[in-house]
Amino acid sequence: MLGGIKTVSRGYRHLNRYRQIVTILLRHGLGDLVARLGLHKYLGTSKRIITKRDKASPPVSLTREKRLTIILQELGVSFVKLGQIASTRPDLVPAEVCQELEKLQDTVPPFPTEQAHEIIEKEFGKPVEKIFAEFDDPPVASASISQVHRAVLPDGRVVAVKVQRPGIHRTVEVDLEIMFHLAELMEKHFQGLDSLDPTGVVEEFSRAIKREMDFTIEASNIERFARNFESDQSVYVPDVYRELTTDKVLTMEYVEGIKVTDIEALRQADIDRDLIARRGINLILKQIFEHGFFHADPHPGNIVVLKDNVIGLLDYGMTGTLTGRNREYLGDLIMGIVGRDARQMSQAILEVSQQQVKTDVETLEVDISDLVERYLYCPLKDIHIGSLLTQLVQLLVRHKLKLPPVFYMLFKALIIAEGNGRRLSPDFEIIESMKPYVERFMKKRISLGKLQKDFYTAGLNWEVLLRDLPGDTRQLIKLLKQGKIHIEFEHKGLEPMLRTHDRISNHIAYGIVLSSLIIGSSLIVLSGIPPKWQGIPIIGIMGFVAAGIMGFWLLVSILKQGKF
C-alpha cells in the first residue's frame, strides 16, 4: 500500500510536466497508450473521453518510427538523450526504430550569454572579465545540456569554455522520476516486456546522463586520453585547465580544424584522406585493444583534422570502459569474425552474454555459420562491419542472449568509425585493419609476462583467502551460536509433486471415510435397529445411499484426472 501511495505522490508532484507529456502524446495520436497507462487522470478527464477523441482524430500519415522521433524531440532534453541512448541498443529496440532515433538532433537554441556569465561567476567567485581577457558572444556550439564559448586567457591562450544550461539538473531530475514512473506503468500494463526491461533501460540512462552532466568527469576523460596517446603523434588531445573547471564549467584548449565530413576542405588543405581513414580506425582499435577505454561517440561532428594529417577528438562526455576479461571475449569474437570461424564466434558470445533462457548451442552455431557463409567469399573491402554486427545482434535477440551494455556502445563506435573511414576512402577495409590489433592482443594474452602476472594475482587472492578463512570461520560459528544467521530454502519445481501428493492423500482419506460408512451401515442393518422400512433399518439404508453417492463422486473425480 505504501508503494502505491509513493507512486501517486511522485506522479502528482510534477503535475504540469505530466500534463505537457500527455498533451504531446495525444497530439500525435497516442490516446490509446495514454488511456491504457492511466495517464488521462493528469488531464482531469475520463478514459472513455480520451479513447473517443483518439478514434475521432484524423489518421496519422507518418510512420511509427518517425512519430516517435518527433515526440521525443518535443518532450525535450531528457527524452532526446534517452532516444540517443536507445539508438545504441539494437537488442532492446527494433532496427528500424534505432535507425530513426539516430537522427535525433541534440542542437537547441543557445541561452543568453549573460546567464553563462552568471554561472561562471558563481562557480569561480569573480567576474568573467577577471578570468578571461576575451569571452566571445554568441557561442560556437549549443546543445541540450550545455553550450561552448570561445575565450582567451590573460596570457593569450585560446580556450573553449563549456557552460552547463541553467536549471538543467532540476529538469533532468523531474524527467527521470517521470520516466521511472512510466517504465513501471509499462511493465504493469503491457505483457511481454520482460526482455525489454523498461526500468533497467531508464536506470542505465540515468547513470549515463548524470555522468555527462558532471564536467569534472569529462575533464578526467580528456586527461586519461592524453596519457594514453601522449606518444602518438597522429592524435591530438586538447589540454584541460583544471583551475577553471567545475562540475558546471569545463575549460579546455580550443582546437580548430577541418570537419572530417568536409571533403572539399580536406582536398584543398592537401589532406591525405586514405591516411586519415586508416588513422581513424587505428585510433578506435588502440582505444579498445590497448587501453580498454574508448570514445563512445566518435560521430563526424566530434572529429577534426589538423595539419600534417593529425586527428583531433572533441567532446569526451560519453566514453566506455572494457574490463580485461571483456577485452579477451571481444578479441575472441573479432578473431572469429576475421577468420570467419562460426564456432569461435559462438563460444565468445556464450562466454560474455547473459543468458535469459537455456541456449541451444548447436542451433546458435548453425545460425552463426549461416551468417558467416554470407560473407565467406566476399572480398574484405565489401564486408561492412556495421551490417555484420547489426545482423549478429538480431541473431542474439532471437536466441534470447544479452551482451553487457558496453558492448553495444562499442559496436556503435565501430560502426560510426567505419562510416567515417568509407566516407573518406571508398576502398577502406575495416576488417583488414582489425587483424593486426587482434593478433597482437591474442599473442599478448598467452605471453610469459601475462601468464606470470595472472599467476601472481591468483596467488595473492589465494593468500588473502587462506589468511582470512580461520577468522571468517570463527565469526560464522559465533553468529550461528547467537542465532543471528537464518537460512531459508526456496524449493522450485516441487509444486506439481506436492499437488499430486495432496490429491492422493485426500483420496485415501475419502476412501477410509467411505469404507467406514459402508461397514457402519452394514452393522446397523444386521442389528435391526428401528425405525425400519420393509424390515430394514432406515438409518442403515441412508448410510448405504450416502456411501453410494460418495463412491460415485470419487469414481467421477478419478476419471476426470485421466487415471484409474
Image (spheres, rainbow, N blue to C red):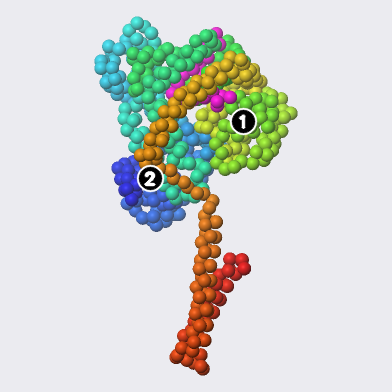
What's the magenta region?
303-328
Residue positioned 44% across, 13% down in the render? 238
- 297 or 304: nearer the viewer: 297
Numbered badge on residue 23: 2
Q: Position of residue 351 (x, y in %)?
A: 59, 32
Mark earlier in primary sequence (1, 2): 2
Q: Position of residue 82 (x, y in %)?
A: 44, 35
- 93 or 197: nearer the viewer: 197
Q: Position of residue 247 (x, y in %)?
A: 35, 22
User: Which residue is tagged 1?
Assistant: 348
In the displayed structure, would residue 389 be above or below residue 312? below
- 493 or 253: nearer the viewer: 493
Residue positioned 46% across, 41% down in the render? 198
Tell whether 24 sits left or right of 233: left
- Specify few, some or many for label 1: CA neighbours under 10 Å numbering under 14, 14-19, or 20 or more: many
The answer, for residue 284, to whether it is visible in the render is no
How far is mark 1 from mark 2, CA to CA?
47 Å
Q: Element at badge 1?
A: helix
Q: Element at badge 2?
A: helix
The answer, for residue 473, to whether it is visible in the render is yes
In the displayed structure, would residue 145 be above or below residue 17? above
